[in-house]
Amino acid sequence: MVEAKVTALLDRLSFEIENKKVVVGVSGGPDSLALLHYLWGQRERKNLSIVAAHVDHMFRGQESFEDALFVKDYCEQKGIPFEMARINVPEIIKNTKKNSQVASRQARYEFFEKVMNKYGYNYLALGHHGDDQVETILMRLTRGSSSAARAGIPFTRPFGNGYIFRPFLSLTKVELVEYCLKQNLVPRIDPSNKKSTYSRNRFRKEVLPFLKAENQHVHEHFQRFSEELQSDEALLQELTVQRMNKVMKKREKNKIAIDIIPFLEMPISLQRRGIQLILNYLYKVIPVSLSALHIDHVLSLIRHQHPSGTLDFPNGLKVIRSYSLLSFQFEGSESHTYFFRNDGTGSNRITYWGKYKNGCS
């Protein structure tokens, strides 16, 4: 069942795993252990090379260290190269004041990229599944995310010098637990996954069961929705890039200015994405407090009959209207020339800015 569903998803998305060199992120839980075991089982038929990578975030002391030893032992039994890191994420949180989940994710992904570079592998496989997809889409819609973020978890996206891919997005948690039982796998269980202090866990315990009671195949519909939204978004992003390059008046590292008159001639869907594009460039890392509501405020400022006004955005970004000029700026901007460019991957990755040189990138 698992293999058939994974194969169907890969075929639908035209993704080949043959001959790939893959780092597999493994926590030791049911999802990631099932993924490692599945790929290990495909290694000869698909000519796969795999390396397991594990991060001990050091939240649970000896218990989390034992998770690492568990994964290490599994890899030794199967002859899978194993890499691990113990990262003191609680100390990182203390020093940086970052959210625990954000800090953990950043530490984990940085290590995964190091492992990819060490082995020269260009793919990272992660065990996100269909239930994760439902939760993510609902959480982002509830939080007020905009455009591409509403599509949830992409099957594949650029990462480091390669790509992330998630072959289990067509499966449910229950199917992965059953797969572990059939394969005689005894995964580790992280007790923090049950804490209601995390919003994802509240969606998992309270919202997801209701949806599954309505339709047990709800994860399949959410995955289709995600794929369709991502493909639509890729086209809209490309169109946005083309139009935004024509309305730019000033392009600096910490300041962007646009001409309001031609901007208003753009379709509203491109206007929203154009503003999002500017915010992504200026912020580099979007603040958690920024939402689609901020884009609505920019549009209201542009359309207001008063010719001037200012909006204060998170982290000191100001949006200033002066007649037909709209500026987004931080203090202390340095002057550089930039232009919008599509990343050409076909994914829903936000397009970015590149330095202008002789009319091409």
Image (cartoon, rainbow, N blue to C red):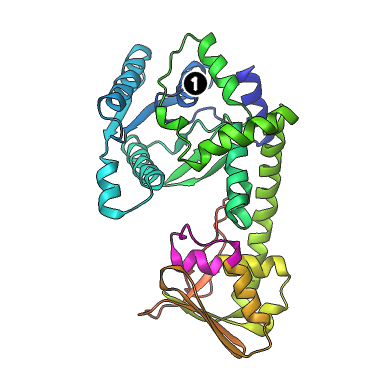
Is residue 210 among the parts visible in the rendering? Answer: yes
Pinpoint residue 221: horizontal percent, then vertical percent. 72, 36
Residue 333 versus residue 191: which sits nearer the camera? 191
Highlighted range, magenta: 277-293
Task: Determine which residue is flagged by label 1.
Answer: 34
Query: For the residue carrying disc 1, how many other residues have a C-alpha within 10 Å: few (<14), some (14-19), or many (20+)?
Result: many
Residue 283 is one of the magenta-drawn residues = yes
Vertical order, 78 against 16 (above or below): above
Residue 275 versus residue 46: which sits nearer the camera? 275
Helix, strand or loop at label 1? It is: helix
Report the residue at 60% width, 68% height from top: 295
The mark total stands at 1
Pinpoint residue 350: horizontal percent, then vertical percent. 55, 57
Q: Amino acid at mark 1?
A: Ala
Pinpoint residue 182: horizontal percent, then vertical percent. 54, 9
Q: Is residue 134 left or right of residue 81?
A: right
Pinpoint residue 37: horizontal percent, then vertical percent. 47, 18
Residue 201 versus residue 246: which sits nearer the camera? 201
Report the residue at 29% width, 54% height from top: 96
Report the residue at 43% width, 13% height from top: 186
Vertical order, 269 against 27 (above or below): below
